[in-house]
Image (spheres, rainbow, N blue to C red):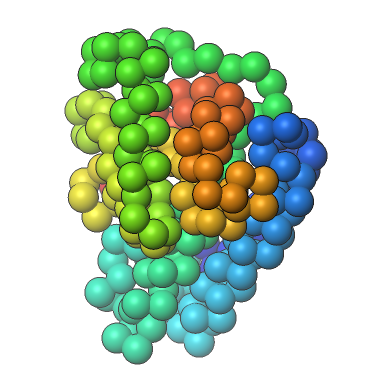
Amino acid sequence: MHNHFPFILPQLPYSINSLEPYIDEETVYIHHFMHEKKYIDTLNSLIEPYPQFYLWTLEKLIRDTKCLPSQIQQDVRNNAGGVYNHYLYFNSLTDKLSQPNGKLLAEINNQFGSLYNLKEQLKASATSLFGSGYAVLAKNKKGKLSIRQCANQDTVLGCNLMPVLIIDMWEHSYYLKYQNQRNEYFDNWFKVINWDVVENIYNMYNFT
C-alpha cells in the first residue's frame, strides 16, 4: 500500500468476482471502487493544502490527529480511518482455501480455546454492533489477542492495539446480497478470510 500522500486506491489481490458466491461481485465493485475510493479522494483533498503532512502515514494521521489543524481534525480522522479499515478488510480476503496456523493459531487456541470459539465470539461482536462499524481481532504489544468493536471509521490504534483482522459491518458491505441477515454475511465472510495475510500481520505488525 502507498502509505502517504497522495493515497491511491490499491489493487485488489483477487479478481472482482472471485469471492462469489460468498461476497458478490456487485458489492465488491461498489464497496471498493466507490466507497473506499471516496475515502481516499476525500483524505487527499484534506491533506493537499498542508505539505508538512505529506509524508505522514495513515497510522500517524490516525494516532496524531490532534496535531493537525483543528478545522480538519475530525474529517481526517474519519477518512483516514476509512482508508485504513478498508485496506485491511479487502486485503484479508481470498478466493483460495485458507486456514490459520503457526503462532497465530497457537494464540487463537490459547486465548479463545479453538478457532470455532473465536469465530463465534467475533460473530457475536459483529452482529451485535449497533449501526455502522467494524468487529476487530486485535493484538496488544505482547501479542495477546482480543475482540473489539469500532464504531463508524474508528480504529483500535489509539488503544495501544493493532488490528490483525476486521469485518466491515457497514450496510454497503453486505446489504445487496444479505439485506439484514448479518449472521449469514458473517458466516460467508469467514469462509474467504486469507489466514496467511492475517498471520503475516500478526507476526509483522510493530508498534511505533
**Is residue 139 toward the left or the right of residue 170 in the image?**
left
Residue 114, image quadrant: top left
Foreground: 127 or 194? 127
Q: Residue at x 39, y 16 (%)?
A: 116
Q: Residue at x 40, y 24 (%)?
A: 119
Q: Residue at x 32, y 39 (%)?
A: 125
Asked if residue 185 shows in the view, the reply is yes
Rendered position, 207 above or below 188 = below
Q: Residue at x 55, y 68 (%)?
A: 39
Residue 34, image quadrant: bottom right
Foreground: 109 or 158? 109
Residue 13, image quadrant: top right
Q: How many marks?
A: 0
Rendered position, 53 above or below 115 = below
Rendered position, 14 above or below 101 = below
Foreground: 111 or 186? 186
**x, y percent for residue 154:** 35, 59
Foreground: 68 or 139? 139
Asked if residue 59 shows in the view, the reply is no
**x, y percent for residue 136:** 36, 41
